[in-house]
Amino acid sequence: MSDVRVLSCIQPTGEVHLGNYLGALRNWVSGQHDKDVFHGVVDLHTLTVIEEPGIAGDATLRTAAMLFAVGLDPDVATVFVQSHVPEHSQLAWIMQCNLSYGELSRMTQFKDKSAKRSGGFVSAGLFTYPALMAADILLYDTEEVPVGDDQRQHVEITRDVAVRFNHRFGDTFVVPEAVLPAAGARVMSLQDPTSKMSKSDESDAGCVYLIDAPATIMKKFKRAVTDSDTGADAVRYDRENKPGVSTLLDINAAITGRSPQQVADGYEQYGKLKVETGEAVVEALTPIRERYGDLLDDRGELTRLLRVGADRAREVATATLDRAHAAIGMLPT
Ligand code: TYM
């Protein structure tokens, strides 16, 4: 194991989908044997939108089971639940005090999510969310943050707040970097290929979940939106003019380890591209779905693994929080 420290997290909202897998989870697994990796199920983040009781705990356990199902090995990877490590909330406050109202107002995710809820309840937590995310990252002296493209801006603001804190109070935090996959950094919806695949999709048809049955996955791919072009060069990678076809090529490329252009060279018809991409996804996801089922059958063992993860995470997190308090010059307890 090298000393390179990696951290990345996932929110336990809804089911884990193909975008999460190709944009992030797959790279968490491939990094675990040669880096020192921490992966959190960030339940506190979901409180920004949860308004009823009894949901958070079960969703957290299911998402944690999925992290082990995709291949994170509890012997080498530290997998933990955010609320089990209270230092996250504690450092988040300090981060809020070192970020400005203006910076937070510019976050595209806040603008999108608050617009979607306009007229409804927009929590203050939705606004200060990036401060909690910065705390998640900085607590672990993280050098690399493997994420999908949509989290790039959040990692950028984390860098800004780390640099600002270090400047104000003295060198305390490691300044992290986002690491994006070569293919799959932005998987788009199969129904609306100009929007990213997302748990909050209007329809389930555009979003492939890791627990979908093979027949469901095939149906989603067969119904994927393309266009009405015909002819020998209809299958080509062109995000601007052919978003549907490009989405299929992106997914196929990410799964089979080729470039979208290389994939396009092998096809003349949309039908065949849809079916073969669906089949490649089914093949990749089947063992994951099976392991997920087995893991969820033993909730006691999952809980134990998460307790071990939280203990390991706390060791690092406490030391960093102490360092931040000392740097500011707060009165020791
Ligand atoms: P979340 O839970 O929305 O997504 C988890 C990971 O999946 C990636 N992702 C995608 N990648 C490609 N295509 C898509 N359509 C797609 N949709 C999601 C995300 O980029 C992410 O890497 N704020 C974060 C959670 C978080 C976090 C952190 C991440 C909290 N603290 C600290 C890294 C470090 C989020 O909501 O991700």
Image (spheres, rainbow, N blue to C red):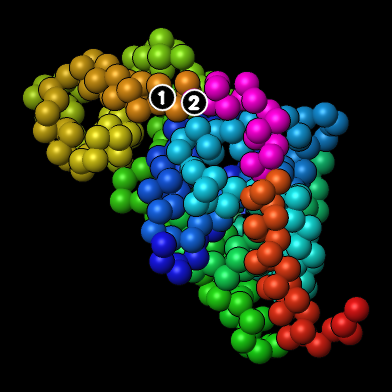
Q: Quadrant of residue 128?
A: bottom right
Residue at x-position 24% and y-position 35%? 256
Amino acid on which the number 1 mark rests in the picture: Pro
What residue does disc 1 label? 287
Q: Percent x, y for residue 14?
A: 63, 30
Q: Percent x, y for residue 261?
A: 17, 40
What residue does disc 2 label? 291
Amino acid on which the number 2 mark rests in the picture: Arg
In the drawing, does residue 81 fall left or right of residue 19? right
Q: Percent x, y for residue 213?
A: 46, 14
State the separation of the CA atoms marked 2 and 1: 6 Å
Image: magenta residue range: 291-306
> Disc 2, disc 1: CB below 8 Å?
yes
In the drawing, does residue 132 fall left or right of residue 290? right
Residue at x-position 30% and y-position 35%? 255
In the drawing, does residue 16 fall left or right of residue 35? right
Number of marks drawn: 2
Q: Percent x, y for residue 321?
A: 73, 72
Is 292 magenta? The answer is yes
Viewer-side residue, 70 vs 246? 70
